[in-house]
Amino acid sequence: LSATFYPIIDVKTPISFSQRIAWAIRSNADSLETTVNQWLENKQKKTDYYVIYNKYFKNLKRSASRSYSEFSSVSGDKLSPYDEQIKETAEKIGWDWRLLASLIYQESRFDPNASSWAGAQGLMQLVENTAAEFGAENLNDPRQSLTAGAAYINWLQNTMKEYIEDSVERQKFIL
């Protein structure tokens, strides 16, 4: 279960025998035990129970595949195929490169050909008008997408300065 949320934790080596989790109820609390058991039985009949169960116990492959991809810090030393370009770009706008990389991952999963239902394209998921305004002609070109995206972020930072003085809060707002 922990590996789903903390993919850098190595859970391959067992540190104890397999255990079931249970609720502790006072031995003379028959009414409470009955109520808890009925509650659990009712929950197990509802869709929400299976949604939650599947999320935490059935869907572990997705997490494992991310953990051991070539761009995972567990198995590699890169976050993306564009790390060097992202580092250069982040320096220009005064951001930690990993924050910019996480934004790009969230927007496009590092896919330079990604496109959204709203017409946003490329690594930074810019729409054509915004991209053109900030110098990108081909949003599927990672360099152009990064450059235009950084210029847009820089414009947002400068525009928001008078409204949000604290740079950390301004960055959160932009994100």
Image (cartoon, rainbow, N blue to C red):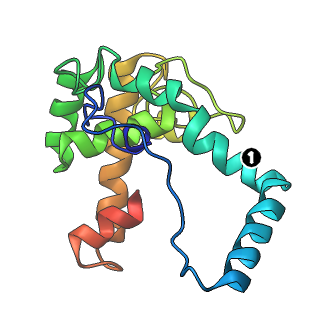
Tell me if 44 is positioned left or right of 57 in this view. Answer: right
Specify whether residue 155 is in view: yes
Identity of the residue drawn at 68% across and 76% down: 33
In the image: residue 109, left or right of residue 120: left
Vertical comparison of 133 with 47: above or below: above
Q: Residue 92 at what x, y percent from top left?
A: 16, 42
Give SS at disc 1. helix
Count of labels in the image: 1
Residue that sits furthest to the front in the current view:
28
Q: Where 78 sits versus 129, above or below?
A: above
**Is 161 rendered above or below residue 86?**
below
Query: Circle 1: is it few (<14), some (14-19), or many (20+) Cα within 10 Å?
Result: some
Question: Who is closer to the viewer here, 24 or 100?
Answer: 24
Position of the N terminus by quadrant: top left
Q: Position of residue 89 (x, y in %)?
A: 22, 35
Up/down of 69 relative to 51, above or below: above
Quarter holding residue 75? top left
Nearest the eye: 73 or 101? 73
Is residue 133 rendered to the left or right of residue 2?
A: right
Expressed as whole percent of the image width and height from the top left, the position of residue 16 reads 29, 39
Residue at image mark 1: 50
- Does residue 110 appear in the picture of this structure? no
Amino acid carrying mark 1 in the image: Tyr
Give the residue at x 23% y 40%.
98
The residue lying at 16 percent from left, 31 percent from top is 88
